[in-house]
Amino acid sequence: ERELTLMLLVDISASMDYGTQTQLKREFVAEIAASLGFSAAGNNDKVGLILFADKVYKVIPPQKGRKHILAIISTILTADYVPSVTKIDAALEYMMSVFKKKSLVFMFSDFQDEYDLKILRVAAKKHQLLGMRISDDKDNQIPDVGYALFQDAETGRQIWANTSNSRWRYEYAEKQKQLARKTEEDFENAS
């Protein structure tokens, strides 16, 4: 059997430090990372972590062991989430330049920002790349609460919206569905 390297690329932009139900997106990512990490540790595989937003903020090189996995989970949970636009391309380019060995890569993000499809394809050819879209119910559907002020957690841009307008809520939900479909198709077609 060959040794596998598992890389976790985690978006730490401010939109990932959010949650309206039982947990924040970061907590959900930590749960998934724990499952993947402990499974890899059980197979004696290495696990590494890259935290990114507008640039790469922290790298934990791949290592083996349960203690290492616990350090990765703690890092995800305690990271300072950054109010900036996510640059998925920067994370992928960094990973490809530093980690040459073919790895199994899980990228956790809400994928609300643009990315270069060419870079995604190159990364998917060099590594086995899986995109994990992390979202909250309120990311996809906004409830009727009347006039509300919305602020983009990454850019700080604010807009007022009449959430009582069913057409506005419908168009917002449809735009989010299209974005989710596009991201899914992009990752499927890249491999």
Image (spheres, rainbow, N blue to C red):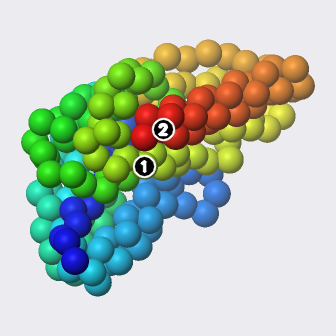
Residue displayed at 89% across by 25% down: 166
The answer to whether residue 74 shows anywhere in this view is: no
Left or right of 49 in this view: 31? right
At 19% from the left and 72% from the top, the residue drawn is 2
User: Quadrant where the N terminus lies?
Assistant: bottom left
From the viewer's perspective, tell me whether residue 67 is left or right of residue 37. Answer: left
Horizontal and vertical percent position of residue 59:
15, 49
Does 113 sit above or below residue 99? above
Residue 23 is at least partly visible in this image: yes
Extreme residue in the bottom direction: 42
Q: Cα distance, mark 1 to mark 2?
A: 7 Å
Residue that label 1 marks: 130
Question: Which comes sooner in the sequence, label 1 or label 2?
Answer: 1
Q: In the image, what residue type sits under mark 1?
A: Leu
Q: Assess disc 1: are there few (<14), some (14-19) or many (≥20) residues with their C-alpha within 10 Å of its C-alpha.
A: some
**Residue occupying the point 36% across, 31% down:** 120
Q: Residue furthest front?
A: 1
Secondary element type, mark 2: helix
Give the quarter of the image for residue 146: top right
The one of 123 and 148 positioned closer to us in this rendering: 123
**In front here: 32 or 21?**
32
Answer few, some or many: residues within 10 Å of disc 2's Cα (few below 14, many 20 plus, some between 14 and 19). some
Q: Which residue is mark 2?
A: 187
Q: Quadrant of residue 175?
A: top right
Q: Are marks 1 and 2 in contact (CB under 8 Å)?
A: yes
Q: Amino acid at mark 2?
A: Phe
Placement of the C terminus among the 4 image quadrants: top left
Question: Tag 1, which secondary structure?
Answer: strand
